[in-house]
Structure formats: C-alpha cells, structure tokens
Image: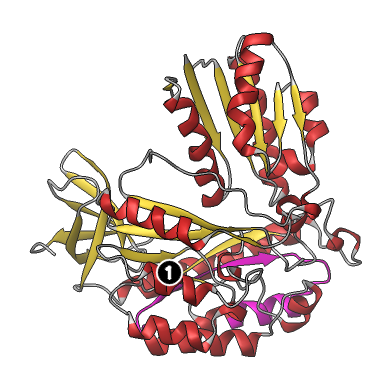
C-alpha cells in the first residue's frame, strides 16, 4: 500500500509528519509523492497566518480530489483550531496537535472498516510532552530534532499558544539519544527546533536550555544550529556557552523582532523594546562578529501609523539583518489583536511589505558581500549536473561546481556574492 504526505509551515511540523510517516513505512507502506494517488494521504496543517489557513484548505481539497478511494488524514495547527472546516472539506480522520501517536492505528481502522475519526483535544489541559520518535530520516543531510512543544508568550496577534498549548519540554535523555543516532548516521549538522525553542526547560526544575546544550555538546562530529531564539532567551549563561564552543555552533541566529517600533511592540505583547533587542544582538556579535542575524518582521499591525512604520524600518536598518521574513499582519480568530482599533487597510499593508522587502534585499546583499573572496563551509544538500547546492555555517545559500555528494562539508570560496544564492568555487577539503 502507498502513503503520501504534505507538511505545511514550520520545521516542527515536518519533524512530526516524518515521525508519523515512519510508522507507515515500518508497516510496509511505500512512500509516494503527494501528487500521486495513495491509500493514505496525510496533511500536516499550519495556521500561523490567513495565508497558511488558505494553503491548508487547498492541500486538503487537493488530496481529497486525487484520493477518492483513499484515507485522508489531517493533523496540525489548522485542524486543531478549525476542525469543522476540515470536516466540511471531507477528511476521514481529523486530529490536531496531540494524539499523533494514534494516527497510524486510526488510519488502519479507516482503511479496514471505512470508519471516520474526529479526535481534537483541548490543548489548554496538556502538560506532558508527546514523545513521537523519528526512527528513520527521509533526508540524509541536515537533521532536525524537536526538543519542545507549546508557547506561553500569548502575543496579541498569534494563535499558536491556543493551537499548541503551554510549553512542554522533551525528556533530555530522549533528545541526546536522538542526537547520538543522527551523529552515528553521519549527519554533519543538527538543528534544534521547537515551537518556542529557547523556552526549553521552563517547565522543568533546575534544567534549562543551556543545560541541554551542554549535554548535546558531549556528542561530537557535527555542527549545531538553533532554529530560533527570542531576544529574552539570550541569557549571559547561554552566550557564555556559545563563546566557549564557537567551533560547534553555527554563527546564524534567528531572533524574531516582529516590529521595530516600541509602541507597536507593546501592543503586540512582546516582552522587550528595541533598545533591549539591539543590546542582545550586539552581545551575539561580540561572540560571533560575522554572525548572520535573521528575523521575522510584521507590517500593518493594528495602530501602525506611517511614523511607526518609518521608525521600525530605520531600526531594522540599524540592526543590519542578514535576512528578514517580511509578512503583513492578518487577523487571527483566537488572537486579541483582531479586535484592536485602527486596523490597517490592505493597500497600505502591501506597500509596507514591498518597502521592507526592498530593505531586506539591500541588507542581505550587504551582509553577503562581506564574504566575497572568503571561504565558508557548505553542507551539500543537493547535487545535479556537476553543480552542488547547500548552506554555509552562517546559512548563506551557495551553489558551486563540484562532484560532491549530499551531506559532504565542502570548503567553498565565495566568488560572486548575491541574494538569495551566492556562487562559490570549491577549495581544499575541510
């Protein structure tokens, strides 16, 4: 029998989807591309923006249309918060962001008895991390390890705490065992990820994120990348650990800003102002002078005036990001900001998105030009026709002529600094 899947949104979703798919592969299913007919089709959904909602609906409809005789199983954040919408489209099995360990059994029941299942739990009641192991990895280059689930921030624009529940940390022994497994497989880079990665340990006694990193560092043979860290999580203890282990940590830090104006940050219920944020970025650069600082930036939040926007843009320019993910605010049904006054119109949002994207390209090119004629270590993720593609330690996309294969670390001299992809020339082996 055949199984297919589509995972939308973050790397946590991809990790969770792969863990579920593994159960099917262990049972003898054959994995086929999502666009091909399958006996079971799994869609892991996202609801971070209205665009994410639309993509989730689209992929569920597409799966239902192409797999009329198969089982359509939907999981993830969109199905957690909008299960009735999913049911209306026509899924056979609907779970949310829990009970993923039961999905295989539910699908088998649906195949054998044509039963439908609707299983949504109230995430506000969840306090335990749901352990769903990844026994085999569909990629053999960069390995992702989920260390945490949930978020306690309750930013006024965001539904994720309602979809995912409160912070729940994974057992450290399970994490380190997975690290050892990936290292033994020969993976050269491991990425630690979560819904709020740096919040790891918040629900534990006397064991935090820095403690976990200390245990992971005992395992050798790979570089460590952290998917995202809030400015408030960049403690002196964590920065000291980075400083003592510069050779193990990738000099790339995604630190969500969301907006560069203090009044808007307060309305967003972010836990810092721009001065605090800037000082934290400077502390990172004191440890990694050439670090790639990337971020998320939202425009058009309710109440954002032209003056707010200009102040925010200038602050982003001051920080000098290596890349920004720019997106317009969209009202979310479970988030408070949908009821805020002074909602910004769509035309203004689109204008501001374009303005910030122009700034993004300017800053991204400026950062990449720092590495012209310098050598970086590129992890090969794809190779075809004598051209290798991958990311450097500071997360620059690089292509270069090479006979290298996937998962090789290649020293590459940057000969053309461009965005989004720079061109390199292979140097001597690392």
- Comparing 87 with 128, the one in front is 128
In x, y percent, where is residue 421? 33, 57
The colour style of the image is secondary structure
In x, y percent, where is residue 79? 73, 38
Give the residues in magenta. Answer: 288-315
Q: Quadrant of the C terminus?
A: bottom left
> What is the secondary structure assignment of the residue under circle 1?
helix
- Comparing 310 with 137, the one in front is 137
Residue drawn where x is 74% and y is 53% of the image: 126
In x, y percent, where is residue 332? 80, 53
- Comparing 110 with 405, the one in front is 110
- Indicate the quadrant where residue 29 lies: top left
Residue drawn where x is 30% and y is 77% of the image: 370
- Comparing 83 with 404, the one in front is 83
Residue drawn where x is 50% and y is 46% of the image: 15
- Can residue 75 be seen by looking at this rendering? yes
- Is residue 311 found left or right of 3 in the rendered image? right
- Is residue 322 found left or right of 168 in the rendered image? left
| Residue bearing the label numbered 1 | 364
In x, y percent, where is residue 74? 66, 31
- Can residue 420 be seen by looking at this rendering? no
Does the segment drawn in magenta span residue 198?
A: no
Q: Is residue 311 above or below residue 384?
A: below
User: For the view shown, which residue lies furthest in the left direction?
Assistant: 428
Badge 1 crowding class, 10 Å Cα cut-off, few under 14, some 14 to 19, many 20 or more, is many
Does the segment drawn in magenta span residue 311?
A: yes
Q: How many marks?
A: 1
- Indicate the quadrant where residue 224 lies: bottom left
């Amino acid at each position: 029998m055949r199984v297919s899947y589509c995972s939308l949104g973050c790397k946590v979703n991809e990790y969770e989807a792969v863990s579920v798919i593994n159960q099917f592969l262990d049972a003898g299913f054959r994995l086929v591309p999502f666009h091909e007919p399958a006996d079971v089709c799994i869609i892991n959904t996202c609801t971070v923006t209205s665009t994410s909602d639309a993509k989730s609906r689209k992929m569920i409809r597409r799966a239902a249309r192409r797999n009329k005789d198969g089982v359509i199983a939907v999981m993830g954040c969109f199905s957690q918060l909008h299960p009735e919408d999913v049911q209306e489209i026509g899924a056979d099995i609907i779970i949310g962001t829990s009970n993923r360990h039961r999905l295989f059994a539910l699908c088998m029941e649906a195949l054998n008895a044509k039963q439908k299942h609707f299983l949504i739990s109230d995430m506000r009641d969840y306090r335990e991390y749901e352990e769903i192991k990844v026994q085999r990895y569909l990629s053999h280059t960069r390995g992702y390890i989920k260390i945490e689930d949930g978020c306690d921030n309750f930013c006024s624009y965001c539904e994720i705490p309602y979809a995912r529940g409160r912070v729940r940390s994974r057992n450290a022994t399970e994490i380190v065992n997975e690290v050892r497994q990936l290292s033994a497989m020969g993976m050269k880079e491991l990425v630690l990820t979560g819904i709020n990665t740096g919040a790891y340990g918040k629900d534990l006694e006397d064991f935090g994120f820095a403690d976990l990193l200390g245990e992971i560092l005992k395992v050798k043979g790979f570089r460590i990348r952290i998917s995202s860290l809030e400015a408030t999580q960049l403690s002196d203890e964590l920065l000291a650990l980075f400083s003592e282990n510069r050779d193990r940590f990738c000099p790339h830090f995604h630190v969500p800003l969301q907006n560069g104006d203090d009044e808007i940050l307060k309305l967003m219920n972010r836990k810092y102002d721009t001065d605090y944020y800037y000082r934290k970025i400077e502390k990172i650069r004191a440890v990694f002078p050439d670090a790639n600082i990337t971020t998320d930036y939202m425009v058009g939040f309710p109440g954002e005036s032209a003056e707010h926007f200009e102040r925010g843009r200038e602050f982003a320019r001051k920080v000098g990001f290596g890349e920004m993910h720019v997106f317009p605010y969209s009202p979310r049904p479970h988030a408070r900001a949908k009821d805020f006054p002074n909602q910004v119109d769509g035309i203004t949002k689109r204008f501001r998105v374009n303005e910030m994207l122009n700034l993004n390209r300017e800053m991204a090119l400026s950062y990449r030009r720092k590495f012209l004629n310098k050598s970086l270590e590129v992890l090969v993720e794809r190779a075809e026709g004598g051209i290798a593609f991958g990311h450097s330690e500071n997360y620059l996309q690089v292509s270069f002529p090479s006979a290298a294969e996937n998962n090789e670390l290649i020293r590459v001299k940057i000969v053309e600094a461009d965005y989004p992809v720079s061109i390199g020339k292979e140097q001597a082996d690392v």
